[in-house]
Amino acid sequence: MKTLIQAILIAILAAGPVLAAPKPVGRECVKLTQQISRYQRDAGWARDRENVLWETASLNQIERLATRRAKRCPEFHEQESLIGRLAALALKAGELAARYYLMGL
């Protein structure tokens, strides 16, 4: 009986740090992604208005948010790389289709 109690205590002590580590909430990852999108939009507006300070501040904030999201939500980085590759593939397919339909023009 004593060894069973010792085994349970050792298991609890070993699992403690793993269970105590803060895990990101899925909603936090979504919120960070939405904030990044907002600042990307703002950077575009700043570029259109030729406001260098606003654009620089927006780009710096995007970098900070992206770094934070990469640390807290690694699955979002994997999704973004997949989405980026699919977008590049779609652009290439569009270029090839345009050449085909315009007969090389």
Image (cartoon, rainbow, N blue to C red):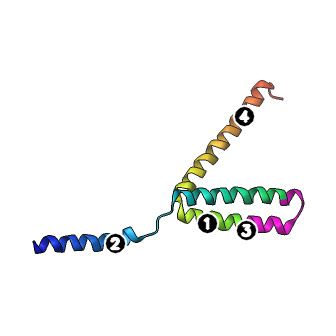
- Residue at position x 66%, y 43% in the image: 87
**Which amino acid type corresponds to the residue marked 2 in the rendered image?**
Gly
Secondary structure under tag 3 reads: helix
For the record, the magenta segment spans 46-60
Rendered view: 96 above or below 14:
above
In the picture, the disc for residue 16 is 2
Query: Measured along the vertical axis of the image, is residue 79 above or below residue 96?
Result: below
Name the amino acid, label 3: Asn
Per the image, the residue denoted by label 4 is 94
Mark 2 or 3, closer to the camera: 2
Say whether disc 2 or disc 1 marks the residue closer to the N-terminus.
Answer: 2
Q: Give percent across and percent down for residue 17.
A: 37, 72
List the residue tagged with mark 1.
67
Tell me what residue is drawn at x 84 percent, y 60 percent.
Answer: 46
Residue 60, disc: 3
Q: Earlier in the sequence, mark 4 or mark 2?
A: 2
Pinpoint residue 57: horizontal percent, then vertical percent.
77, 69
Say which element carries label 4.
helix
